[in-house]
Image (cartoon, grey):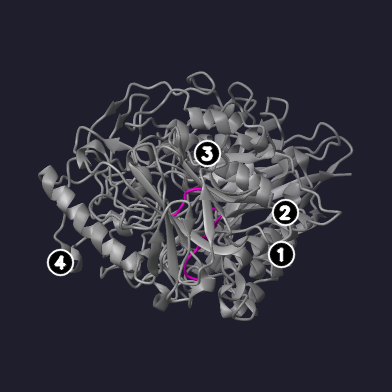
Amino acid sequence: MTTGPDRARRDRPSVHLAILPIPSGRVRYNSAHAQPRVPRVPNSAAPPVPSARAPQGEISFSVSVSSPPLLTPPRLDGFRRYKSAPAALRCRRSHSTQRAPAAASPPRARQSVQRFDALRSNTTKVQSGKAGRSVTKEMGHISSGNEVPLKYSSGKAFPLGVSQVDDGLNFAIFSQHASSVTLCLKLPDRGTQDDVDIVEFALDRQKNKTGDIWHVSVEGLPASGVLYGYRINGPQGWQQGHRFDDSVILLDPYAKLVSGRKHFAVEREKPSQLFGTYDFDSSPFDWGDNYRLPNLPETDLVVYEMNVRAFTADESSGLGPAIRGSYLGVIDKIPHLLELGVNAVELLPVFEFDELELKRFPNPRDHMVNTWGYSTINFFAPMCRYASAGGGPVAASKELKQMVKAFHNAGIEVILDVVYNHTNEADDANPYVTSFRGIDNKVYYMLDFNNNAQLLNFSGCGNTLNCNHPFVKELVLDSLRHWVKEYHIDGFRFDLTSVLCRGPDGSPLGAPPLIKDIAKDSVLSRCKIIAEPWDCGGLYLVGRFPNWDRWAEWNGKYRDDIRRFIKGDPGMKGVFATRVSGSADLYQVNNRKPYHSVNFIIAHDGFTLCDLVSYNSKHNDANGEGGRDGCNDNYSWNCGIEGETSDLNVLSLRSRQMKNFHVALMISQGTPMMLMGDEYGHTRYGNNNSYGHDTHINNFQWGQLAERKDDHFSFFSEMIKFRHNHPILRRDRFLNKNDITWHENSWENQDSKFLAFTIHDHNSGGDIYLAFNAHEYFVDAVIPPPPQHKSWSRVVDTNLESPKDIVPEGVPFTGSGYRIAPYSSILLKAKP
């Protein structure tokens, strides 16, 4: 997510990359569209031609890492007057563009330290407003006013977080550079909810520390309902990378549950201290005797990207207020997904995040709510405000498992969109200390030690997690294993995964340890692992991501090339053929397969499919940044009129174009992914960066679905089912000359926007003929003879009105030619 007035795209990167770290607080990059755009001409077999690349699992670069200029910290009273939102507020923006960094005048180091001290003091006031009062600090035996004894002993270093031991509960936390650690316990049964004693244990570094792990065992605590955190102190040297402040109660990175606000986006709950919590009282979740994991082959996946809250938050969902926008609400709508035909959901972040982070102080975007969730607070805990009726963290955990179980029982896999590239703790100009920064900033984050140890920003969100540090790497792996073991998650899509390919100084690594370990981990071996192979610092790795033959990739080149051909850009026929036949130019290396290309035309950031054919430019004024945010290069076409219209000719053309895009996606070799709402034509009214709108702009409109059930939805659903029923559209190997025939003899003609081809079925002779016409005029196509003892049947013609636009059983077709309308596509099936 990026923002700012300058809009320099990260286009056409070469093998020799100059990686430009983004100055914190001045985000200018956005990356999803950046790529070389060299058309590839198909040969007589299949278009893709593999290009030379580094060996499997390696990145080969010549890279220079230049340091960002030191920022001039704004004055405290300047919060109300800045012109561009600081990185502290950049809760998930679009990855779809990239901007050049703006210059900043370097301040003295002392000014930065003073700025941080002042803001962390302010943060402490916000966080600790209702934290309660400290009762006592003793060693060995502690009691509050109620004289309930708690006993402590040295404890053990592992496992990290909270665990049960014979004599109580064990607490363990990592901090390499801390000089003191104090465990803080909040015991609700010793006071009212708003005035609760906090019991503190100051750990003895001789008795309660093993290596870099601080630990203590506490006897006498309840097995659930206790809230806990830590106060941690250490060296105060800003230039050495430290940000310790023991006035702040910090969240345990290994907390399996997080307690904070109970209700989503309720502002009266805004000043809420975050605590870890646990539940050892509840019985293990009952997955059921007949429960089975779907374990779908990657060749068979059709992925549906969706937001848990937005799926049912709208009143049109027909659900009660306590259920809308929750895990349980999703369960109620699984029949819709089954009718659509998708068999995997990719959920926008469900790790605990702060949806009210835009409202921390007055700013031009404080009217918005972070509804996408790309601002992780904790990597182990489910988003507790997705629980029904404000049920809290324990309910959230249980209801998430209920949702996963329901998906699995319906044969649908669950893939999580996970954010390990940055956290919610913002940048050095506007720090927000909740956990990692105060525990051990020097370990958890990438720092620029040539520039006052400021946070490097390859995420576009103010900080960058130091993922290949040995301890941070293990934290990420432990987190992933936790989601697989505890919640039965089937796979992960890693946000801005190129960040995970960087070393502590931000330099790209040839064989990133974390990426390799994820690929080789035994617990994760059954999981789908998907990279978003770029970041906001210029490391674009589509087709070159270190993969160990395991990693799939969001194929950003597929998205752009399909968009450009369908809307009629010249010179795109050859590369369109390459993309629909599996992008072998990118992925036919070592033992990679076509399904390692996750094909998508639309994703959560950017235009919806309806907006892609309705707007030539973005309309993001509602975001509060004067239209400066979001991607400028969308490869969209409004079909003649910008935005909403009642012109029937324009509306008809838009409908055809949406169907053309969907046909191309569903017949392409690889793994197709579509966006929630595109099955009925959801619009965000031209907003291509809608991260901050907890409204109809993002929320699924069930009323519109009902209105379009018999036409638009029916076409999308039947096309998905056609893919499922025809294995030749989802091969587990790349096409050869016997698999496909290109009915084309003018590959070099840049003005040609028509492409026809036949995909051959060697088993049953059920060949499939496809033709795409992106011209503005009719094309008379010569139809090849069908296989022996077969005849052609028309299944799809996007120029026809529903229900004739798609007829799954086919309409018999005779003749040697077909007149294909402008901006339309056809699909013929050979049948006995």
Is disc 3 in contact with disc 2, using a CB cutoff of under 8 Å?
A: no
Image x and y of residue 80, in percent = 19, 69
What's the residue at 42%, 51% (across, down)?
635
Q: Which residues are magenta?
A: 251-263
Q: Which quadrant: the C terminus?
A: top right
Q: Position of residue 628 (x, y in %)?
A: 28, 59
How far is mark 3 from mark 2, CA to CA? 39 Å
Residue 301 on image: x %, y %: 69, 46
Q: Amino acid at mark 1?
A: Ile
Residue 738: tell me if it is visible. yes
Classify 69 as above or below 373: above
Look at the numbered discs 2 and 4 and tell me whether their residues touch, using CB distance below 8 Å.
Answer: no
The CA distance from mark 4 to mark 1 is 49 Å
Mark toward the start of the polypeptide (1 vs 2): 1
Q: Quadrant of residue 175?
A: top left
Front-most of residues 337 and 455: 455
Q: Is residue 260 magenta?
A: yes
First in sequence: mark 4 vs mark 3? 4
Q: Residues within 10 Å of mark 2 (few under 14, many from 20)?
A: many
Q: Main secondary structure of the magenta part?
A: loop
State the residue position of label 1.
334
Comparing marks 3 and 1, which lies closer to the viewer? 3
Q: Amino acid at mark 4?
A: Asp
The label number, if any, that marks residue 157 in the structure image: 3
Q: Which residue is mark 2?
A: 412
Q: Amino acid at mark 2?
A: Ile
Instruction: Identify the element where label 1 is drawn.
Output: helix
Amino acid type assigned to the residue bearing label 3 in the image: Ala
Give yes or no for contact between labels 1 and 2 (Cβ–Cβ under 8 Å). Answer: yes
In this figure, which residue is indicated by the disc labeled 4?
77
